[in-house]
Each structure stands twice: as C-alpha cells, then as structure tokens.
C-alpha cells in the first residue's frame, strides 16, 4: 500500500474547481446561443430598413463570469439611429455592464441582507469574481420602480389595518450639519386570518402602504385602498390598530363612523409592566387590559395612586392614567363594534401585527445606518415589493416574483421559441462537454442520466 499513495484534492478544492470549469463552459454555451440568435435575427430582419454596418463587441458580467459577445450593429434608415437588434430582442441595454438576472439577484441580496457591500461580497464569494461595485448596485436600486398591481383585490365587509412609524437616521447635509431622524409611516392591510396548515394562523391578502406624499397620511391611505381594492367608502369598515401617535389616532376624524381605532395592546402592556410590575395589583390590572375593560383598568390604576415607592413612580403613574383615559374607547374590543353592525366575528383574531411588521423593516433600515431621502424610499419600496410579490421595473426590464408561474399557480406555458432554444442549448452543451459524447454504458453516462429532472 505504501507504493500506492496517489494524491487527491480535497472535496473543497474539487468542488470549487468543478464549479469554475462549469462556469467557464456554460459561459461559452451562452455566448454561442446569443451569437446564433443574432445570426438568425440578421437573416430575418427587414433588410430595407436595417442596414448592417459592422459587428461590435459587448461585454457582459453574468452568473457564468464576464462574457464578450460579438453582435451585429445596424443603422435604422427610418430615423438614422444605430442599434444592435439583439439587444432589442433580449430587452437588454448592452451598455450597462451586467446581465438582468445578475442585476435582479444582486438587488434581492441587497434588500434581504444588511448592506449593499455585503450583497456584493456575497456575489463575489459565490461567483468567484466581483461583477459590480456596491455603488453601482445602489444606483441600480435607486433607478428601479415598483409597479402597481395589475388587478384590484375584492374588498370584504372589513379591512384590518396595522399602522406604525419607524424612525431612521438621515445622512448629514453637505456642510456637515446633522439632520433629524425621519419617520417612515407604514400601514399593513389585510382581510382577516386563515389557517396555514398547522395550528398557527396567518394574515390573508396582505398589502403594504408606504406614505411618501405631502398630503395627510389618511388621505393618501384611502387613495391607496381605492387603487388596490374594490373599496367602497360607504360600505367597507376599517379596524385600525396602532399606538397613540397623533397622526395615527387622527383616523377617528377622517373615518368617522366607518373605522374603529384600536390602541395597540403591545405598547399599553409594555408601559403597564414598566410602571406597575412590582405593585400587588399588577396582575389584576393586566387582566382588565386583556379583557378589554378600560373602566376597570382605570379604577385599578387610580387605586394605586399614592402607593408608589418613589415620587418619580407617582409621576409616571399619573401620566399613564391620563393616557389610558384619553384612549379609553380605543381599549374596547373591536369585535363588539363589528357585531353591533351585524358582522360575524367568530373567525377573527386579536390585532397586533404592527410591532412585528416594524421589526422586519428595522432589520434593514436601522442598525446604525444613515440614509439619503431617495435611498431609504427606494429600499422601503423594494422591501414592500418583495413582501407583496409586486413587479419591479429595473434598468434592464422587469423583476417578476415567482416568474415560473402565470399568477394562477400553474407553470407558464412554453413558447415555440423557448422549446427551440432549449434543444439548441442541449446540443451546444453536448458538443462542449466531452463526457456527453461517451457511450451509454459508461459510469459517467449513467450518473448524468440519473440527474435528469433535477
């Protein structure tokens, strides 16, 4: 055995090497496919309109590495402009530098991850080269635009709304002067709750509203409802959950008789715990809050006046009593309000998703980061697009969530062009991978055949 001691690479070295070889190989295949498409376009073009000038190189960074493609360059006799018809057919601007798929992947990483730099670093780690700078990625995201849904959702009797604000740091002005933190005002709208296959429940038909205009929040929000739902202001009831911020509680004036303002229990329970956790009547106070009985809660709080351990505690208790008294109606059970209007409530759950909603946005937008006004707006819109599965218009075309389906849950039908290209790619791969030319009895042939369907 001492004489038989071959030296093999480690699994890590082997895996990296195979990946790099496949990247290079598939890059060659993609180049061949694109150049063959360009030749077909040249043959089928309107020769009276498009005059062939020459062939020019275009450099594209892709998932397979940087590619150089020679494609035909034409003059359009109708307007005198010079174009590459291949770029037109591919819905790709060859001057931009990297492929649409790479662009979409990078922006998705930037939205889900902690920073633009981290997204670019992830791409470099996986692909083996840096296809873009973090600033280029940021500029692409700033230039993107979230598209409106193509159809409205039906509006049931009740729409549930979770509203909250998130303060983010703003970048300093040119002179170095600090700016105040900016409050992002966001609302989550849903149509109720449903079972998700387990004992847990999830929100149905979620949509997010991000307030960006100069008009008051609730006016902009109602316009949003009209755009996204078959919303009838005379029929649709709103249950609005939020903290005691003035801009949120203003909904009571904007939707008089049409909305129930529900004070978020998380904030009330948190403040009650901070002030009264050591008091002997604390558990009774919590029970009154949980049972939506503001009168009993106020009585219990008033009974504690004069029993606090410190003057500071007395001051906090008095301020809390005033707060609860001012929002007494918002501490009642919203289901009772709906039942009084003849609406069935037996499937409804407690409100309170706003805090979880804000924590998801905060994970990307806070953590010590400072933003420009355009930057934080673009990132917030992208996060919403990802959550609501909305299309995004980018420099290179459209980013479509769940691109493999046609919206009904079924796979989109293949076109004749896609089928033809699939056969062409298979032939090109076979011609460029020597293993594909081996006889059917070999081990490698059986292994590759076993991968069919993956």
Image (cartoon, rainbow, N blue to C red):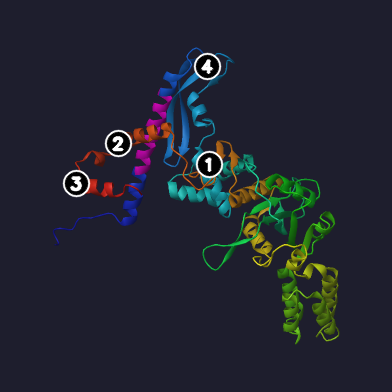
The answer to which of marks 4 and 2 sits earlier in the sequence is 4
Structural distance between the alpha carbons of marks 3 and 4 = 52 Å
Q: CA distance from mark 2 to mark 3?
A: 18 Å
- Image spot of residue 107 (x, y percent): 56, 46
| Mark 2 residue element | helix
Query: Which badge, 4 or 1, comes first in the chain's sequence?
Result: 4
Q: Residue 144's quadrant in the figure? A: top right
Q: Residue at x 72, y 70 (%)?
A: 265
Which residue bears the numbered disc 1?
103
- Spatial CA distance of label 3 from label 1 is 40 Å
Question: Real-space Cα distance between discs 4 and 1?
Answer: 29 Å
Q: Main secondary structure of the magenta part?
A: helix
Q: Earlier in the sequence, mark 3 or mark 4?
A: 4
Is residue 36 within the magenta segment? yes
The answer to whether the residues at label 3 and label 1 have Cβ atoms under 8 Å apart is no
Q: Is residue 367 at least partly visible in the picture?
A: no
Q: Which residue is mark 4?
A: 75
Front residue of 130 and 159: 159
State the quadrant of the N terminus. Answer: bottom left
Which residue is labeled 2 in the image?
A: 432
Q: CA distance from mark 4 to mark 2?
A: 35 Å
> Which numbered disc flags the more N-terminal residue, 3 or 1?
1
Mark number, residue 179: none
């Amino acid at each position: 055995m001492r004489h038989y001691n071959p030296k093999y690479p480690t699994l890590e070295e082997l895996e990296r090497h195979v990946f790099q070889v496949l990247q290079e190989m598939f890059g060659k295949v993609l180049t061949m496919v694109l150049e063959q498409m360009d030749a077909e376009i040249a043959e089928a073009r309107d020769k009276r309109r498009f005059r062939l000038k020459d062939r020019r190189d275009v450099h594209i960074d892709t998932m397979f590495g940087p590619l150089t493609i020679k494609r035909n360059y034409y003059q359009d006799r109708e307007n005198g402009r010079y174009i590459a018809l291949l770029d037109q057919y591919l819905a790709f601007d060859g001057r931009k530098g990297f492929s649409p798929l790479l662009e979409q992947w990078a922006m998705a990483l930037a939205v889900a991850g902690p920073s633009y730099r981290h997204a670019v670093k992830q791409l470099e780690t996986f692909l083996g080269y840096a296809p873009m700078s973090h600033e280029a990625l940021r500029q692409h995201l700033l230039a993107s635009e979230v598209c409106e849904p193509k159809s409205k959702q039906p509006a049931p009797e009740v729409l549930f709304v979770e509203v909250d604000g998130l303060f983010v740091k703003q970048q300093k002005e040119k002179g170095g002067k600090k700016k105040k933190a900016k409050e992002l005002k966001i609302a989550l709208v849903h149509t109720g709750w449903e079972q998700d296959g387990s004992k847990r429940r999830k929100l149905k038909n979620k949509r997010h509203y991000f307030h960006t205009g100069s008009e008051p929040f609730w006016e902009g929000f109602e316009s949003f409802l009209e755009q996204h739902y078959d919303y009838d202001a005379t029929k649709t009831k709103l249950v609005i959950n939020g903290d005691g911020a003035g801009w949120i509680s203003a909904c009571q004036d904007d939707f008089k008789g049409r909305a129930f303002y529900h004070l978020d229990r998380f904030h009330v329970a948190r403040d009650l715990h901070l002030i009264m956790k050591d008091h002997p009547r604390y558990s009774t106070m919590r029970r009154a809050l949980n049972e939506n009985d503001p009168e009993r809660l106020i009585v219990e709080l008033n009974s504690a006046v004069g029993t606090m351990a410190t003057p500071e505690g007395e001051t906090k208790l008095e301020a809390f009593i005033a707060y609860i008294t001012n929002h007494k109606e918002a501490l009642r059970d919203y289901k009772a309000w709906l039942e009084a209007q003849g609406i069935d409530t037996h499937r409804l759950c407690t409100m309170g998703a706003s805090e979880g909603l804000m924590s998801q946005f905060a994970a990307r937008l806070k953590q010590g980061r400072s933003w420009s006004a355009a930057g934080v707006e673009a990132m917030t819109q992208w996060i919403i697009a990802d959550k609501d599965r909305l299309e995004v218009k980018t420099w290179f075309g459209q980013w479509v969530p769940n691109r493999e389906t046609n919206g009904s849950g079924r796979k989109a039908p293949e076109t004749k062009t896609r089928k033809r290209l699939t056969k062409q790619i298979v032939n090109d791969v076979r011609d460029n991978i020597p293993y594909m030319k081996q006889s059917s009895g070999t081990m490698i042939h059986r292994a590759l055949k076993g991968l069919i369907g993956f």
